[in-house]
Image (cartoon, rainbow, N blue to C red):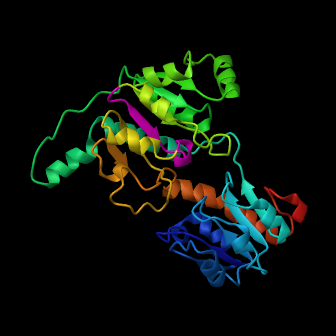
């Protein structure tokens, strides 16, 4: 098949062991991002299969209606960026391994890295030395602090294990069903939502973005956080109500460490999340490691081969078959 891989910004996949799985196909790798559906359709007009890098490109009807040769979209995990109905209408199969029970350890490690970087002022200390200075301030220790994990899922569970190893206290908040599972497992659930935000030294978000969770973190939630507390978001920016985090950061009361933004790539160098000294910002690299890519794309390429062999796997819209 003619396979087009989108948004491999650093041309990483060709150098990974899993790329050998595509040896029987005609592969084109695009190393830039094309947001315009018409322009993207023109460049991938011959594609029979699109391979996606998670949610970097939106796949809607305005693109799919322009690709009559497309037969398969192969990706991994959740797919809020893909119009499944438009796929089915155009005869395009969507395959996505939901990897139940397997967390992204890369994302969990990134969460811990952001917490440590913020508490120990690592970016600012490095910048101070590069400017010819020495120490620029005094950091804080994590041991004995309370980490509040919002969302009772796989990645949060991995982060909780790291926190326990550091001697931190962990408490949870989640949906009603999530809190019920947490209580059944015997872990500490906050008495109330307000108490969760008020008593956590660090709040880390680990919730899937879907219509019912969009804007779930409100201005009142952030206002309840204690001065100098830290909000970490390695999940999705849409979990926080629009403008709420920016407004709270501008007040200078709390700190934040964010890996996700409303618009990506984020290029607004004047945005308060990039300019305020209380914020550490990284460019959505939570899952961006060679190891994680090899794991994810091994699954994705297996889906391509299974489809080509007439026995598709991990099918999201079986009506196409």
Q: Quadrant of residue 74?
A: bottom right
Q: Position of residue 47 (x, y in %)?
A: 70, 80
For residue 257: magenta?
no
Between 311 and 131, the one lying in front of the other is 131
Q: Is residue 108 above or below residue 189?
A: below
Residue name at image x 68 percent, y 71 percent: 50
Please give the name of the residue rendered at 56% of the width and 71% of the height, measured from the top-left corner: 35
Q: Is residue 51 above or below residue 159?
A: below
Does the stretch in magenta take in 229?
A: yes
Where residue 46 appears, as percent x and y from the top left, is 71, 84
Comparing 23 with 278, the one in front is 278
Position of the C terminus by quadrant: bottom right
Q: Residue at x 15, y 41 (%)?
A: 136
Residue 149: percent from left, percent from top: 52, 30
In this picture, residue 148 sits left or right of residue 121: right
Q: Taking 199 as reference, is 235 above or below it?
A: below
**Point 26% across, 40% down: residue:** 121
Image: magenta residue range: 227-241
Image location (x, y in percent) of residue 208: 62, 43
Closer to us: 241 or 54: 241
The answer to whether 251 is drawn above or below residue 315 in the figure is: above
- Quarter holding the N terminus is bottom right
């Amino acid at each position: 098949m003619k396979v087009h891989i989108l948004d491999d910004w650093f041309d990483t996949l060709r150098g990974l062991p899993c790329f050998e799985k595509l040896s029987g196909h005609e592969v084109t790798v695009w190393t830039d991002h094309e947001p315009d559906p018409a322009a993207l359709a023109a460049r991938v007009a011959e594609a029979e299969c699109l391979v996606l890098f998670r949610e970097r490109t939106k796949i809607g009807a305005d693109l799919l209606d322009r690709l009559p040769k497309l037969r398969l979209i192969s990706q991994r995990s959740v797919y809020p960026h893909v119009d499944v109905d438009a796929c089915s209408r155009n005869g395009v199969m969507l395959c996505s391994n939901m990897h139940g029970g397997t967390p992204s350890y890369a994302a969990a490690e990134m969460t811990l890295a952001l917490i440590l970087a913020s508490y120990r002022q690592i970016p600012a200390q490095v910048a101070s030395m590069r400017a010819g200075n020495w120490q620029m301030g005094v950091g804080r220790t994590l041991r004995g602090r309370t980490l509040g994990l919002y969302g009772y899922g796989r990645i949060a569970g991995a982060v909780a294990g790291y926190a326990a190893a550091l001697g931190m206290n962990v408490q949870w908040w989640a949906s009603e069903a999530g809190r019920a599972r947490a209580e059944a497992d015997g872990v500490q659930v906050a008495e109330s939502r307000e108490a969760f935000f008020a008593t956590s030294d660090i709040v880390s978000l680990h919730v899937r973005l879907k219509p019912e969770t969009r804007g779930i973190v409100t201005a009142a939630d952030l206002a309840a956080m204690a001065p100098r507390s830290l909000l970490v978001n390695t999940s999705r920016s849409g979990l926080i109500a629009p403008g709420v985090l920016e407004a709270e950061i501008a007040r200078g009361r709390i700190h934040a460490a964010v890996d996700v933004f409303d618009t990506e790539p984020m290029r607004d160098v004047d945005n308060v999340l990039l300019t305020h000294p209380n914020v550490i910002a990284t460019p959505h690299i939570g899952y961006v490691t060679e190891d994680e890519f090899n794991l994810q794309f091994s699954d994705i390429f297996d889906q391509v081969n299974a489809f080509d062999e007439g026995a598709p796997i991990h099918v999201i819209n079986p009506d196409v078959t």
